[in-house]
Structure formats: structure tokens, C-alpha cells
Amino acid sequence: MPFKLPNAFFVAGTDTDVGKTVICAILMAGLDAAYWKPVQSGTAEGTDTEWIARVTGLPHDRFLPETWRLTRPLSPHAAAEQDGVRIDLSDFTLPMAGGVSHLVVEGAGGLMVPLNDREFMIDLIRHLDLPVLLVARSTLGTINHTLLSLSQLRQYNLNMLGVVMNGPKNDGNRRAIEHYGHIPVLAEIEPLHRIDPAHLRNAFFKFFPCACG
């Protein structure tokens, strides 16, 4: 079923390490978009922004600076405390991405990752007023994580575009997420054998064919 990705949207995850950044790279390559990571936790091994810039080969001006770059690879609230700073929602304003049709915004960790002593990643999504593309792993445990995340998004009355499943294809898990979650699985991203501009662009047209029009 064809769907249209909005001009700006938030890529959230059901958990950490579910593949949000790879999905963002595919979207960036296919949409020729701009990218913004509001909070980066951990900089010693490079940032997500730097990685996506390298693997997509897109121009430097497509990558908007993070609002917070925190040195330790921890939950944002803990990384901020280690750096002696405090994250507030008022710190964040959706940046302008001139000259491109889409802005891809990537979260950090799951929806309930704390930003400070009272607010979470999901509060940042609501603050930015962006629709959500939810990335879930395809393997064991994904039904529980995904349904819990969808429930939380609905409690916050956030606009949900759909789910992207990342990993080996699992028809049973896809059907369960669509049935119990009452939401479409927009793409099932199988493991990529190479990650470079050409393969990322090909992956977009292969896995998101209904969004290519």
C-alpha cells in the first residue's frame, strides 16, 4: 500500500541497538534528506552523525549539529550528569533544513530513556511535534517491545507512521505486530551485506518501494 513520508519525521526505537541508525542511513540515501540527532551519548568511537555522513557520502551541510553531544555512552540523563550538564526540553528547536525535501530526526535508545529527572525521549518527540517511524528488531522479543512502545506512543497521542522491522524476515512477528498493534509494518529491512552509498540507495528502493513515488 503506497504511503508518503512527511517532510520531517522522528525515527524512534523499541530499544537500544535495534538498528535505528542503519535505517536512518537507508532513508537518507533514498530520500536525499537532511539528518539531525538531537542527543548524542558517547563520542569516543565517533557519533551517529559522523557514521551516517561517511556511509551515505552526502554533503556536509545535510548533517545538522546535535543539540547535546555527551561524552559517555550512557542514557542521556546519566551521560549529562557525568558531563556536569542538564538537558531540558527548552534546549531543542527543530532545525531548518533548507534545500531538501525531508528531515530525518533520530532518537537515542528507546522511548522511555530519561533525558533528565522527569522527562523522557518520548517527551522530546512530543515537544518537537513530529510523526514517528518506529524501528523494531525482527527477532524473538520484538512483539512485546513493539506493542509496549506503540501503547506508550498512543498514550502521548503521537502520530505514528508505522513500524520498520530490522533483521532477518519473520512473517509471524510481522503479522503479530500488525494484528495486535493495529499498525502497518511499512518495511522489513533484511541484513545488508555492504553499507555504502549505492547499496543504501538500492536498499531504500527495495525495502521502501511504496514510498518512492
Image: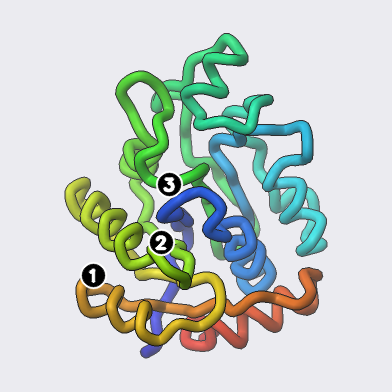
Nearer mark to the viewer, of 1 and 2:
1
**CA distance for labels 1 and 2:** 12 Å
- Badge 1 element: helix
Q: Is 169 situated above or below 134? A: below
* Residue pointed to by mark 3: 110
Q: Which class describes the residues within 10 Å of circle 3: few (<14), some (14-19), or many (20+)?
A: many
Density class for disc 1 (Cα within 10 Å; few <14, some 14-19, many ≥20) is some
Q: Position of residue 165 (x, y in %)?
A: 47, 72
**Residue 159 place in picture, x, y as percent:** 28, 59
**Mark 3 and mark 1: span between their CA atoms?**
17 Å
Quadrant of res 149: bottom left
Residue drawn at (58%, 65%) of the image: 23
Sequence order check: which comes first, mark 3 or mark 1? 3
Q: Which mark is residue 134?
A: 2
Look at 33% across and 28% down and name the residue there. Answer: 119
Q: Is residue 81 left or right of residue 115?
A: right
Q: Secondary structure at mark 2?
A: strand
Sequence-earlier tag: 1 or 2: 2
Of residue 203 and residue 145, the one placed in the foreground of this image is 145
Question: In the displayed structure, would residue 158 be above or below residue 3?
Answer: above
